Image: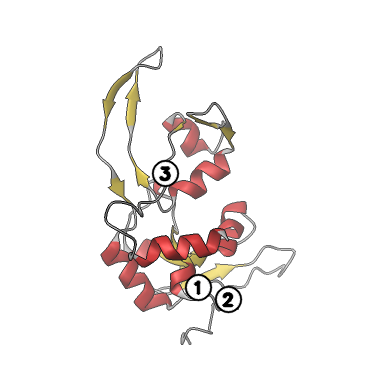
Amino acid sequence: MIEVCQRIMNAGELPDNGGEKPHLTITLPWDALQAKVGAGLLDTGDLLTPETVRRLACDAMIIPAVLGGDGQVLDVGRARRLIDGPLRRALVLRDKGCAFPGCDRPPQWCHGHHVRSWADGGDTCLANSVLLCGFHHREIHHGHWEVRMRPDGFPEFLPPAFVDPLRRPVRNTLHRRC
């Protein structure tokens, strides 16, 4: 059900007065996000793991807020889409769908993912982005598999040692990649 809703949201065919992706307010110190430690605090008081915060931040509007010592808002920055329309279209043209080896999910079912996380200083550009379906996006964030870019500009994946002790890179050849 979540995947169907995401496809509808990504299709861009919802009414102008609605259809915007849901907003979450997550409070987490920048240093903690970069170090992958500490929990993110929702405005409801619920906690999110650092892994969940980083995964949600992959394809989100990020609005930085500077808070004072008592939590008062001192400054709120502008929203910035990390993977925008033109970049997403370029990813669709390049990856043709989920880039994870063996996955046949179409581009409409995929998220944009930073190869080197934006929280770690990764650029928002085609050379640092890859399309992943929701399942494989979570797999990458769990840390067993790694994604990197080949010299020809296409993504490849390094399996965990329990899958291949030599960790030989693999690619998805289902979407016309050789």
Point out the frontmost of discs 3 and 2.
Answer: 2
Disc number for residue 99 = 1
Residue 113 to residue 70: above or below: below
Give the residue type that dot 2 points to: Cys
Point out the frontmost of discs 1 and 3.
Answer: 1
Q: Position of residue 129 (x, y in %)?
A: 40, 63
Find numbered disc 2 in the image and state the secondary structure of the residue it sits on.
loop
Q: CA distance from mark 1 to mark 3?
A: 22 Å
Residue 114 to residue 39: above or below: below
Find numbered disc 1 in the image and state the secondary structure of the residue it sits on.
loop
Of 106 and 118, which appears nearest the observer?
106
Is residue 152 visible to the viewer in this orientation of the structure? no
Q: CA distance from mark 3 to mark 2?
A: 27 Å
Picture colour scheme: secondary structure
Of 36 and 150, which appears nearest the observer?
36
- Write down the residue under mark 3: 119
Query: Label 1 neighbourhood size at 10 Å, few (<14), some (14-19), many (20+)?
Result: many
Q: Are marks 2 and 1 in contact (CB under 8 Å)?
A: yes
**Left or right of residue 92: residue 39:** right
Residue 90 to residue 33: above or below: below
Of 160 and 1, which appears nearest the observer?
1
Disc number for residue 103 = 2
Residue drawn at (43%, 66%), measured in percent from left and top? 130
Splitting the image into 4 quarters, where does residue 74 fall? top left
Of 108 and 152, which appears nearest the observer?
108
Q: Position of residue 126 (x, y in %)?
A: 33, 66
Q: In which quadrant will I find the N terminus?
A: bottom right
Query: Label 3 neighbourhood size at 10 Å, few (<14), some (14-19), many (20+)?
Result: some
